[in-house]
Image (cartoon, rainbow, N blue to C red):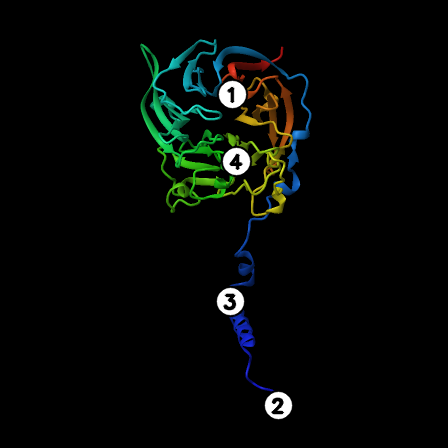
């Protein structure tokens, strides 16, 4: 019996696939084809130095003494003016000008806030050019007519008038849309070292899946010009809406955002049941929430761990059990010379303060953890090198930390 030269339909399709692959190999190098679908490999620090800092013990005796300077009603953020006076925000919706001796004066002109749970008046930051423009940038959750609230980034000029300090020329730089009834707003402001750009953390508003939606302002770190417009070198600057402002994504509840002395941006965020994170923020990075975490759901249902999804950026370190990190400042003063270059982070659940050191390979280590018996909401370094923190409660203290004699 002779052999038929007529190919079956499956054989024809197979031959066409072979021919197509041959054509592609002529047009593109094999290496390029292998790289094309590339999911980002795990970062070097994730493979070599990530640690669970939640299991590290606290030191019994901190090397500083704490002096209570003034008290506030649920204070949320502190910032220093060039003349060494402080700005303090209260979550219910008040802002104060405070001397280092503890005399406080309420600043008028603060907009009405949506105060509920984690929402309210949030961060405050002093303009990089404050000596010329007297501008303050601050965040708050604005009440919406249909209920809930929207995170707002605003700018105003601080004027010290005869009748007291006030905010003038209030301008909305950015407003979150749509509004939300959930908490976890984020709202932390960090100016780039060059003073030309502003970074803003935005939480997932307790709507986890939205952190991965590129068209929703949830679970993101935003980068913008000082007027709120999108810089042309942002990862998706040519696209519309929130995409143009997005610097990184996949965040849960980011309450710490600060630049290290070397210009690297660091962020920390609260995890679910376990899994608080300290992240080295990369341009265009996706940090995986809610698909991965070193914690679990509050119901006890497990969440896949970050190494299972190499396309996501792993944290530099994590805490499980949690510390509930809040506030972060890099130390650059002289009163605590051993702390130079360290990050100081407040702990709400751990009721204290932790110190993080960094190495040139992108690794981070928790080297100190002190229990203060107070929920620490924010941390700031004064021009004289003292460390200032605020306590998260009604009647919360503003504390000045100085070395023990």
Residue 381: image tag: 1
Q: Is residue 148 above or below residue 214?
A: above
Q: Is residue 193 above or below residue 80?
A: below
Relative image position of residue 263 (x, y in whole percent): 50, 34
Q: In which quadrant of the rendered image does the N terminus lie?
A: bottom right
Q: Earlier in the sequence, mark 3 or mark 4?
A: 3
The alpha-carbon separation of the residues under discs 4 and 1 comes to 26 Å
Q: Residue at x 55, y 37 (%)?
A: 280
Q: Earlier in the sequence, mark 2 or mark 4?
A: 2
Q: Residues within 10 Å of mark 1 (few under 14, many from 20)?
A: many
Q: Dot 3 corresponds to which residue?
A: 24
Q: Tell which tag, 2 or 3, sits nearer the viewer.
A: 2
Circle 3 SS class: helix
Q: Residues within 10 Å of mark 4 (few under 14, many from 20)?
A: many
Relative image position of residue 357 (x, y in whole percent): 61, 29
The alpha-carbon separation of the residues under discs 2 and 3 comes to 36 Å
The alpha-carbon separation of the residues under discs 3 and 4 comes to 42 Å
Say whether residue 285 is left or right of residue 61: left
Q: Tell which tag, 1 or 3, sits nearer the viewer.
A: 3
Residue 317 shows up from this direction: yes
Q: Tell which tag, 1 or 2, sits nearer the viewer.
A: 2
Circle 2 SS class: loop
In the image, 34 versus 15, the foreground residue is: 15
Q: Is residue 252 above or below residue 124?
A: below
Q: Dot 4 corresponds to which residue?
A: 252
Residue 203: image tag: none
Relative image position of residue 8 (x, y in whole percent): 55, 79
Q: Dot 2 corresponds to which residue?
A: 2
Q: Are marks 1 and 3 in contact (CB under 8 Å)?
A: no
């Amino acid at each position: 019996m002779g052999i038929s030269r007529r190919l079956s339909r499956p054989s024809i399709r197979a031959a066409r696939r072979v021919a197509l692959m041959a054509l592609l190999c002529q047009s593109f190098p094999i290496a390029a084809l292998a790289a094309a679908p590339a999911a980002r490999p795990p970062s070097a620090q994730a493979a070599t130095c990530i640690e669970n800092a939640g299991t590290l013990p606290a030191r019994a005796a901190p090397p500083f003494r704490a002096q209570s300077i003034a008290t506030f009603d649920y204070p949320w953020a502190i910032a220093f003016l060039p003349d060494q006076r402080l700005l303090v925000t209260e979550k219910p919706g008040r802002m104060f000008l405070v001397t280092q001796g503890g005399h406080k004066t309420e600043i008028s002109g603060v907009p009405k806030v949506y105060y509920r749970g984690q929402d309210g008046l949030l961060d405050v930051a002093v303009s990089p050019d404050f000596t010329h423009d007297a501008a303050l940038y601050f965040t708050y959750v604005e009440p919406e007519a249909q209920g809930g609230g929207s995170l707002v980034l605003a700018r105003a000029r601080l004027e010290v008038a005869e009748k007291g300090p006030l905010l003038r020329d209030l301008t909305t730089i950015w407003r979150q849309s749509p509004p939300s009834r959930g908490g976890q707003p984020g709202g932390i402001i960090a100016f780039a070292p060059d003073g030309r750009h502003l970074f803003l953390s935005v939480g997932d508003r307790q709507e986890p899946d939205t952190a991965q939606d590129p068209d929703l302002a949830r679970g993101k770190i935003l980068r913008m010009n000082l007027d709120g417009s999108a810089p042309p070198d942002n990862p998706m600057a040519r696209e519309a809406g929130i995409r143009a402002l997005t610097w990184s994504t996949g965040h849960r509840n980011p309450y710490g955002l600060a630049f290290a002395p070397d210009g690297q941006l660091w962020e920390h965020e609260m995890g679910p049941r376990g899994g608080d994170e300290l992240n080295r923020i990369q341009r265009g990075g996706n940090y995986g929430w809610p698909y991965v975490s070193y914690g679990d759901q509050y119901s006890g249902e497990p969440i896949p761990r970050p190494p299972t999804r190499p396309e996501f950026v792993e944290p530099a370190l994590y805490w499980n059990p949690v510390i509930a990190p809040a506030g972060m400042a890099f130390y650059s003063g002289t009163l605590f010379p051993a702390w130079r270059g360290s990050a100081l982070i407040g702990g709400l659940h751990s009721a204290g303060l932790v110190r993080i050191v960094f190495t040139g390979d992108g690794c981070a280590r928790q080297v100190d953890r002190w229990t203060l018996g107070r929920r620490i909401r924010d941390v700031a370094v004064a021009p004289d090198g003292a460390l200032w923190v605020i306590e998260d409660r009604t009647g919360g203290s503003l504390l000045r930390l100085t070395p023990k004699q």
